[in-house]
C-alpha cells in the first residue's frame, strides 16, 4: 500500500515536471530526447529515447539511413547510436567515464517519418572502485542541440547500497547532476515497480502530450 502511494505521488510529480518544463509548443519541429539513468555501485546504465517530430524526421532519417534505401540496417543503427553516444558525457566526481553502447532499437522508417517512431539506445558506463559516502554523477547531452528538447532523470536504484539524493538540471535539461550516497552493505533488491513505472509513465506522458501538441500545430 505504501509503495503504491509513493508511486502515485512520484507520478504526479513527474506530471507536474512535464507541464512545467517550459518546452515549446512546436513539437513537430523538435527532436525529443529523454534520458533515464540507473546508478549501481559498479556501473551506470543509460536509456535514451529519441523521438523526432514530423518536421525534422526526414533530416534525422538522412543521418541514419546513409545509403538512402529507406531501410535501416543493423550496421546503420549501430553507427547512428554510436554517433549519438559520442556527444554524451558521463562523469563521477569530475572523473570522466567511458560510455559504451549495449544495444539499440530503431523503429520502421515510415513510423519515424510520421513523427511516431522512438529510437531507443541502451548504454553502460563502468564506475571505478568508489569509497563509501557521497558522490556526484553528471550527465551531459550535446547531440543535435539545434533542433532538440531534452529530459533527464535518475531512476530509483536497484541496489540498497545506493541512495539517490538531489537531482539538479540546467534549464534545458541537457545537463543533469545527481548526488548519491554509496554504502558498504551488499544487500540488493530487484529494480521493480516504482522506478520502471515512473520512468515509463514519464516517457508515455511526454510523448502523448508532445504528439497532441504537434497535431494542434498541424491543424
Image: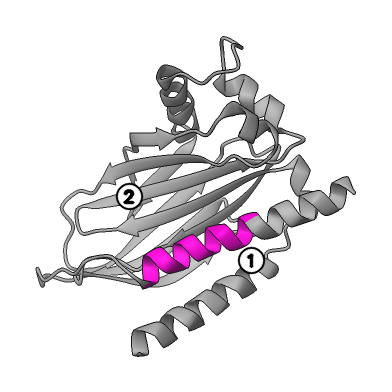
* SS assignment for the magenta stretch, majority: helix
| One can see residue 209 in this view | yes
Task: Examine the rendered structure and indicate whether residue 190 appears above or below residue 211.
Answer: below
Q: Residues within 10 Å of mark 1 (few under 14, many from 20)?
A: some
**Residue beneath disc 1:** 18
Of the residues under marks 2 and 1, which one precedes in the sequence? 1
For the residues bearing labels 2 and 1, Cβ distance under 8 angstroms: no
Residue 83 as seen in the image, left or right of residue 145: left
Residue 59 as seen in the image, left or right of residue 142: right
x, y percent for residue 191: 27, 65
Nearest the viewer among 149 and 194 is: 194
| One can see residue 172 in this view | no
x, y percent for residue 185: 10, 72
Classify residue 57 by image quadrant.
Answer: top right
Label 2: which secondary element: strand
Q: Provide the residue span drawn in magenta.
A: 194-207
Q: Which mark is residue 45?
A: 2
Amino acid at each position: 500500500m505504501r509503495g503504491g502511494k509513493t508511486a502515485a505521488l512520484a507520478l504526479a510529480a513527474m506530471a507536474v515536471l512535464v507541464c512545467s518544463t517550459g518546452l515549446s509548443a512546436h513539437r513537430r519541429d523538435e527532436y525529443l530526447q529523454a534520458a533515464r539513468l540507473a546508478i549501481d555501485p559498479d556501473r551506470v546504465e543509460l536509456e535514451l529515447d529519441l523521438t523526432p517530430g514530423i518536421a525534422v524526421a526526414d533530416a534525422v532519417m538522412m543521418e541514419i539511413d546513409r545509403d538512402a534505401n529507406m531501410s535501416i540496417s543493423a550496421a546503420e543503427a549501430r553507427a547512428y547510436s554510436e554517433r549519438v553516444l559520442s556527444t554524451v558525457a558521463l562523469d563521477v566526481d569530475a572523473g570522466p567515464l567511458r560510455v559504451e553502447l549495449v544495444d539499440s532499437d530503431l523503429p520502421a522508417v515510415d513510423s519515424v517519418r510520421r513523427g511516431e517512431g522512438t529510437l531507443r539506445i541502451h548504454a553502460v558506463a563502468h564506475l571505478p572502485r568508489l569509497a563509501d559516502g557521497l558522490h556526484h554523477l553528471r550527465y551531459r547531452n550535446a547531440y543535435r542541440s539545434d533542433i532538440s528538447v531534452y529530459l533527464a532523470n535518475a531512476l530509483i536504484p536497484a541496489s540498497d547500497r545506493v541512495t539517490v539524493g538531489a537531482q539538479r538540471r540546467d534549464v534545458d535539461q541537457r545537463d543533469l547532476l545527481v548526488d548519491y550516497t554509496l554504502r558498504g552493505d551488499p544487500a540488493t533488491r530487484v529494480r521493480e515497480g516504482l522506478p520502471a513505472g515512473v520512468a515509463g509513465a514519464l516517457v508515455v506522458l511526454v510523448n502523448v502530450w508532445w504528439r497532441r501538441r504537434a497535431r494542434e500545430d498541424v491543424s
